[in-house]
Amino acid sequence: MLRTAAVADSRYLDHSAGRSHPERPQRVEILNQVVQVMRRDALEVVSPRSATAEEIELCHDAAYFDLVRRSAEFSRYDFDPDTHASPATFATAMLAAGGVLTAVEAVTQGAADNSFALVRPPGHHALPGRAMGFCFFNNIAVAASWLTTSGGLERVMILDWDVHHGNGTQAIFYSSRRVLYASTHQYPFYPGTGGLNELGAGEGKGYTVNLPMPATFGDAEYLAAFDRILMPIGRQFRPQAILVSAGFDAHHRDPLANMQVTEAGFAAMARRIKRLAAECCDGRLVLALEGGYDLEALAASVQAVLEELGREADEPLTAAPPSPRIGPWLERAQAVLRPYWQLD
């Protein structure tokens, strides 16, 4: 068994985006119940710390940080039509970014083999100077920036399997070759970014890998993308740590999207990225919760992924069976990426 740290805390319930908002406290409430049921020797529940202002400002403008801080003075503050703050939002967002850093520290300091930060609010849409898409601070980007500064790493891979493109994460690292950002997402869809030809800029050209997928893709198509594109690119990049923006809104039950992934599919994706981490970076793997808005699907999927994280990484890895729907899509994606990566 591998040692998995689950970062969880009831304080993540404090942020409220509104009574009918899909990013609601019950999302982490049900996950905290999952974690408590799954407590075992190999699953340690860890309390998060809050991020510092200096850590947030690795990715966000100081003026924007101050705006989010001051939003706590209002009973409600609307950053955009989808992104609303309550008096507790700033503190909860600091705890979310800090929770992912706590998960990173557990792995880098040897307290756990891998970790999953069950945090909210999510982060991957947050831009350097703007909140959007339910996100205030870009939790995964702050962790990656911390790893390449205070952590001393030269190569970090971010894999984003949320159904929405992580436009904020992409923007933060678009010109960097130290952070490889790879995303699978429904397209065209919110936020409208993540086209196949968005590849990075300057010295970062080729280090942004977007796999925009049509609606109704499911397990077979996602796993083929992993096996034929993401795993080969990851092996060539050889990250020193892997971070996952783990949204579960590609699940077939999710009300906000139109994909067909199952909890078994998410576990199979986790199995592959865990294998990549074992091959490239001594298993250093950290997941951070992003989307997922059907509570039953979210709980089942997170449980399946946590169970997978706890299994040894030396089991046989079977390639996904071919999907007749994905052939032309794979060929287009590989053709765009071949100038930068060796792909079969």
Image: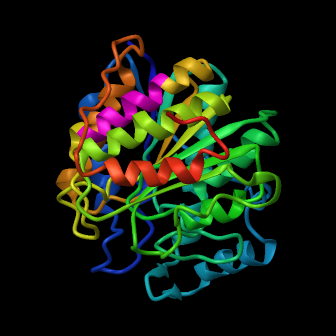
Q: Residue at x 78, y 41 (%)?
A: 148
- Answer with the quarter of the image where residue 103 lies: top right
Q: Main secondary structure of the magenta part?
A: helix
Residue 172 in view (yes/no): yes
Q: Residue at x 70, y 45 (%)?
A: 179
Closest to the observer: 81 or 263? Answer: 263
Closest to the observer: 99 or 72? Answer: 99
Decide if residue 175 is on the left or right side of residue 156.
right
* Start-end of magenta stretch: 265-275
Q: Residue at x 76, y 43 (%)?
A: 178
Residue 98 position in % (x across, y down): 61, 49
Q: Relative to 104, is 190 above or below? A: below
- Verify whether residue 301 appears in magenta: no
Q: Quadrant of the N terminus?
A: top left
Q: Residue at x 53, y 61 (%)?
A: 196
Residue 260 position in % (x across, y down): 21, 54
